[in-house]
Image: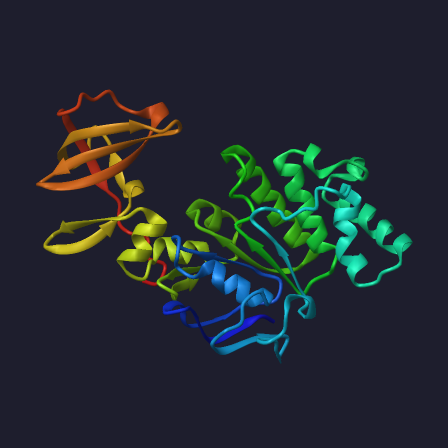
Amino acid sequence: MLSFENVCFSYGEAKALDGVSLALKKGELLTLLGPSGCGKTTTLQIAGGFLFPDSGRVMLDGRDVSALPPEKRPTATVFQSHALFPHMSVEENVAYGLRVRGTPRAERLRRAAEMLERVGLDGYLKSRVQDLSGGQQQRVALARALILNPRVLLLDEPLSSLDARLRVRMRAEIRSLQKAFGITALYVTHDQEEALSISDRVALMQGGRLVQVGTPEEVYFSPHGDFAADFIGDAFPVTLEGRRQLLRPDQIVVAADGPLVGTLVSRAFLGASTDWVIDWQGQTLRASVPSAAEPAREIGGEVRFAILPSRDRNA
């Protein structure tokens, strides 16, 4: 399947990728996750043939495709902007790749109709893409990529332009389609929740390098270092029994009979949960408290709590 072998790439003097080695498993969805400038989109563009590595190799089904342009690779890309053609109908957009390949008109329109039915847009064949909602345009972009039967589907932050509620719905739809087609997918996002919810594995990147690769549970519960713990789990350092540890807000449990006592410094209502900042022995802790069960506390008041042990899956 798709693999990167010690891939390096620079934009002028700025190194974007520094020895990236990564192998996707057949049929999995692997997400490249990291902050802006970490190299995740560059990695995807190299996978698709939009950029070429300075050194190292990109292998696909045992073949070196490092120097092949996009049209010569068995990949298809869903771009952040969708990249739909406004002068074409939905049907024509979906069939465009087949048209480029020289597929007869009747055949490509038949397959476009079938694909639009698969993504729930069978009633929109003749519609203009600009008349569709953001979620519908995203489905058109997916259909246009999937109709090519690619060996690998590349998705470059495909949900970033959608509102929060639609993003949640669309990521579930993308995951469902990926499983239904049994296709291998490389997904890029900077959103931690999105990565954890949609992926078979997550590859966390920083400064052009891979920091950690593992299942969502592995990277969340067993982070490799402070950066991974903070970026994925919103962890914070604390000294317990003379030893520095990293804790997450969900490990701080506010309870009337809690063995530890601190002071409530601030609170921030977030809807389903409320974030509490607690001062304990001169250390700052953060707790995620279910809003429906949030106890009444004044700022500056006493807080009793317990600390749950870390669930290190590598232990």
Q: Position of residue 173 (x, y in %)?
A: 62, 43
Splitting the image into 4 quarters, where does residue 166 fall?
top right
Splitting the image into 4 quarters, where does residue 98 fall?
bottom right
Q: Position of residue 171 (x, y in %)?
A: 56, 44
Picture colour scheme: rainbow
Q: Give the residue at the far right of this rendering.
A: 106
* Residue 124 falls left or right of residue 6: right
Q: Is residue 167 above or below residue 28?
A: above
Q: Position of residue 287 (x, y in %)?
A: 26, 37
Residue 262 in sight in this render: yes
* Nearest the eye: 290 or 114: 114
Q: Quadrant of the C terminus?
A: bottom left
* Residue 297 falls left or right of residue 126: left
* Nearest the eye: 45 or 169: 45
Residue ID at (59%, 65%): 48
Q: Is residue 157 above or below residue 133?
A: below
* Nearest the eye: 35 or 290: 35
Residue 260 in sight in this render: no
Q: Quadrant of the N terminus?
A: bottom right
* Nearest the eye: 54 or 199: 54
Splitting the image into 4 quarters, where does residue 224 fall?
bottom left
Q: Position of residue 73 (x, y in %)?
A: 66, 69
Tally of marks: 0
Residue ID at (17%, 29%): 264
